[in-house]
Image (spheres, helix red, strand yellow):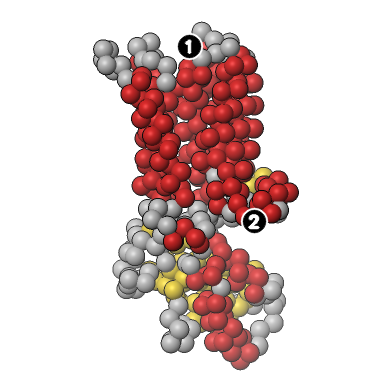
Amino acid sequence: MMNLFYIIWNANPEIISGLPPRWYGLLFALGFLIGSYIMRWIYKLDGRDPEEVERLTLYMVVATIVGARVGHCLFYDPVYYLSNPLKILYIWEGGLASHGAAISIILGMVIYSRKVNEKFFWVMDRIVIVVCLAGAFIRTGNFMNSEILGLPTESGNGVVFAKSVNDILMFRFDGRVDEINFIKRSGEITENGVPITIRLKYGEGVGVDELSENNYYKSNVKSYLMGYEGIRNHIYEESDKELDYKLFKNGNTYYAEIYTIGIPRHPAQMYEALYCLLLFISLLSLWYFKRESLKDGFIFSIFMIVLWSLRIIDELFKENQVDWEADIPLNMGQWLSIPMIILGLIIFIKTYPSRKKL
């Protein structure tokens, strides 16, 4: 019977294949664009000049990108990047850390507040609202990229991330295959994963010697499924069994179907996107209805406590970003969240409206 509690995710990170922008870049930009419009509305209701939001957004964007990149380099691979400092600038190679962005945003807002003669905590109470929204967009972008993977669910529920499997097989077939689809199929759900079919469509007119091609599947394709880490992380193939597949022709086009096991994982990116969105709605509502009675810094403190506490929990469902995290009791994301929570608690105690009802 078909299981409806897992999905196979093979989305193309590119909006238009071969052309920029990618989904991640678009969602990253949309987070800041929509956030700036919300900030203009907030500034207007607060009796501030909405035009000032342009300068504020500039500070935010620069602080986010610089802090996220430097944070990733120093938190996760300091030896390499300090030995190769120019590599820090290679942001297109990937590697951004949200904790680094958070620290940089706080420092950036200190500078901004002094520059415009505005109270720091007043600014932070408003900035963190749109930061939550941007976080939801960015984590959705990570999902589109099939990155920041969650741990296997060890059940029939979750997401089978198939993009790296798709890319490796397309590369190994060297242009002979035009399209690869991943399809749910009926069958027993085991502790190893869920039954899926990998359907390969050969290019029209591609000549196929069926004897040679069958040998290729039995030896080479089987070794691909078991040898590549980018496949092993998402496909379970038993070493002591022959590859279960079928090669057939439909009209003038050859197809192959590989019957294997997909490994469902926690969509940890979307967990984070969801709680960022909920926190955005909650903080915006708190500001809108209670801003006149709250001390400056209170909303900021709630953000720091709730977001980073949820982040510690979310990390329990994620793969470690670097191998050495397996040797420490908490991973780097959890360790870095702790001082954020402590800072939030200190501010909360100082700003809690004990004499006023929320």
Q: Amino acid at mark 1?
A: Leu
Pinpoint residue 190: horizontal percent, then vertical percent: 32, 72
Between residue 205 and residue 39, name the one nearer to us.
39
Q: Residue furthest top?
A: 47
Who's the residue at 47% across and 19% down the image? Answer: 121
Q: Residue furthest bottom?
A: 211
**Label 1: which secondary element:** helix
Mark 1 or mark 2, earlier in chain: 1
* Foreground label between 1 and 2: 2
Position above or below: 235 against 29: below
Residue position for label 2: 80
Residue position for label 1: 45
Q: Residues within 10 Å of mark 2 (few under 14, many from 20)?
A: few
Pinpoint residue 48: horizontal percent, then vertical percent: 54, 10
**Label 2: which secondary element:** helix
Q: Answer with left or right where residue 87 lies relative to residue 30.
A: right
Between residue 348 and residue 277, name the one nearer to us.
348
